[in-house]
Amino acid sequence: MTEKEKRDLGYLYNANYDEELIGEIIGTNDLCHDYNQLRPSDWEARRALLKRIIGKLGKEAVVNAPFWCDFGYNVEAGDCFFVNRNCQILDGGRVTFGDHVFIAPNCVFTTAEHALDVEQRNEGLEVALPIKVGNNVWIGAGTTVLGGVTIGDDTVIGAGSVVTRDIPSGVIACGVPCRVLRSITEADRDRYPHCP
């Protein structure tokens, strides 16, 4: 069984010394580098290159540079996907974003979980745990989302959070580790002033 097959089945795999995986990461990093060099106003070239990087990309996606991912083909993004600057997606495992997901600057989504045993870790062994982000989710600046986590629909993750476990739908959650603060209510519609 190849290291890639082990990874995709959820087994410990050699992420650091396997030539096939290293080659895929370098190829994707080269594409990300090229993407990050494009002019922000060159929408057509940005969209074309982003489609080569990300496995499945919905309509009206905006990803501001710099942006980095490991493989790209394990990332799936729905419609109206917005990513602000300096996002990193370590996508050894599948990373799925629903429709209308907004990601603030400096966020990290990492499916990689390194072995706890020192000998296994020094051999380069890790597992890749999937991440799923629902529809209508806002991820605040500087947030880290770890592998194995699902974030439900209509949820807000506060800035600086470290999401280590599942977060339900329709809530505001934040902190280290990220915890649910409260449900989002109708009163939240009036939180900010409306134009008369």
Image (cartoon, rainbow, N blue to C red):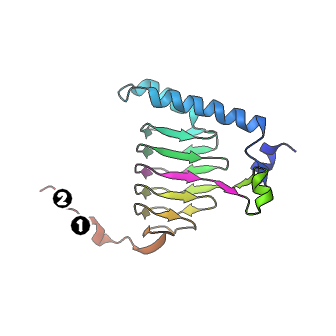
What is the magenta range?
A: 97-114
Q: Quadrant of residue 26?
A: top right
Three-letter amino acid code of the residue under disc 2 = His
Q: Nearer the viewer, residue 86 or 156?
A: 86
Residue under the image location 49 percent in, 39 percent down:
67
Farthest left residue in view? 196
Residue under the image location 57 percent in, 37 percent down:
54
**On-image quarter of the C terminus:** bottom left
User: Badge 1: how crowded within 10 Å, few (<14), some, or many (20+)?
Assistant: few
Badge 1 marks a residue whose secondary structure is helix
Give above or below for 187 relative to 31.
below
- Residue 183 % position (x, y): 40, 73
Q: Quadrant of residue 138?
A: bottom left
Three-letter amino acid code of the residue under disc 1 = Asp
Q: Which mark is residue 194?
A: 2
Q: CA distance from mark 2 to mark 1?
A: 8 Å
Residue under the image location 73 percent in, 54 percent down:
126
Q: Is residue 185 left or right of residue 169?
A: left
Q: How many marks?
A: 2
Residue 100 is inside the magenta segment? yes
Farthest bottom residue in view? 182
- Given contact means CB atoms under 8 Å apart, are the residues at marks 2 and 1 in contact? yes
Q: Which residue is mark 1?
A: 190
Give above or below for 164 relative to 61.
below
- Residue 23 % position (x, y): 71, 32
- Residue 44 % position (x, y): 43, 25
Residue 78 in view of the camera:
no
